[in-house]
Image (cartoon, grey):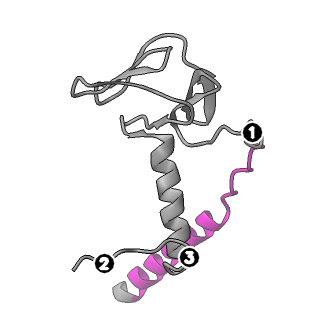
């Protein structure tokens, strides 16, 4: 008799617990405004970094592009001046030219380097065939 009573009591409490959980309501969703789209001007990329464009130093951070007004120091110690002169972390000085890019980590990519990369990419897409001939060393 005790066993039957304790079994029924346990079963009743378990059913009451499940019934109580089924009665709770889900919180209603609140309205969320859609994210704004970032408008990119022609010729300016979304990639974060510093670029020399039309004789001005343009800085892009988190999709926002502005002109550099005052000297800025990057995380690795590279210093960028508003006139385009860059003092690298090792102390060497470079002046940015039109189309040169500097990442926010301090890596400089010149317009010449980009042109070389583009030509190598085009050559690899063509399977190495094209007007360019390679000389073999004997």
Q: Closer to the N terminus: mark 2 or mark 3?
A: 3
The residue at which mark 3 appears reads as 130
Label 3–label 1 contact, CB within 8 A: no
**What residue is rendered at 40% in x and 74% in y?**
134
**What residue is rendered at 21% in x and 28% in y?**
90
The residue at which mark 1 appears reads as 42
The vertical placement of 65 against 81, above or below, is below
3D distance between C-alphas at marks 2 and 3: 17 Å
The 10 Å Cα crowd at callout 2, few under 14, some 14 to 19, many 20 or more, is few
The 10 Å Cα crowd at callout 3, few under 14, some 14 to 19, many 20 or more, is few
Q: Is residue 16 magenta?
A: yes
The vertical placement of 104 against 57, above or below, is below
The residue at which mark 2 appears reads as 136
Label 2 SS? loop
The vertical placement of 65 against 116, above or below, is above
Q: Closer to the N terminus: mark 3 or mark 1?
A: 1
């Amino acid at each position: 008799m005790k066993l039957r009573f304790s079994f029924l009591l346990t079963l009743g409490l378990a059913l009451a617990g499940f019934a109580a959980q089924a009665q709770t309501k889900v919180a209603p969703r609140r309205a969320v405004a859609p994210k704004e789209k970032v408008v990119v001007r022609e010729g300016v990329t979304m990639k974060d970094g510093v670029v020399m464009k039309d004789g001005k130093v343009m800085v892009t951070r988190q999709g926002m592009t502005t002109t550099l007004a005052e000297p800025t120091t990057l995380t690795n110690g590279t210093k960028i001046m508003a006139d385009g002169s860059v003092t690298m972390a090792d102390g060497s000085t470079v002046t940015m030219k039109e189309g040169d890019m500097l990442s926010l980590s301090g890596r400089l990519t010149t317009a010449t380097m980009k042109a070389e990369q583009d030509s190598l990419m085009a050559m690899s897409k063509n399977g190495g065939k094209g007007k360019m001939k390679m000389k073999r060393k004997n």
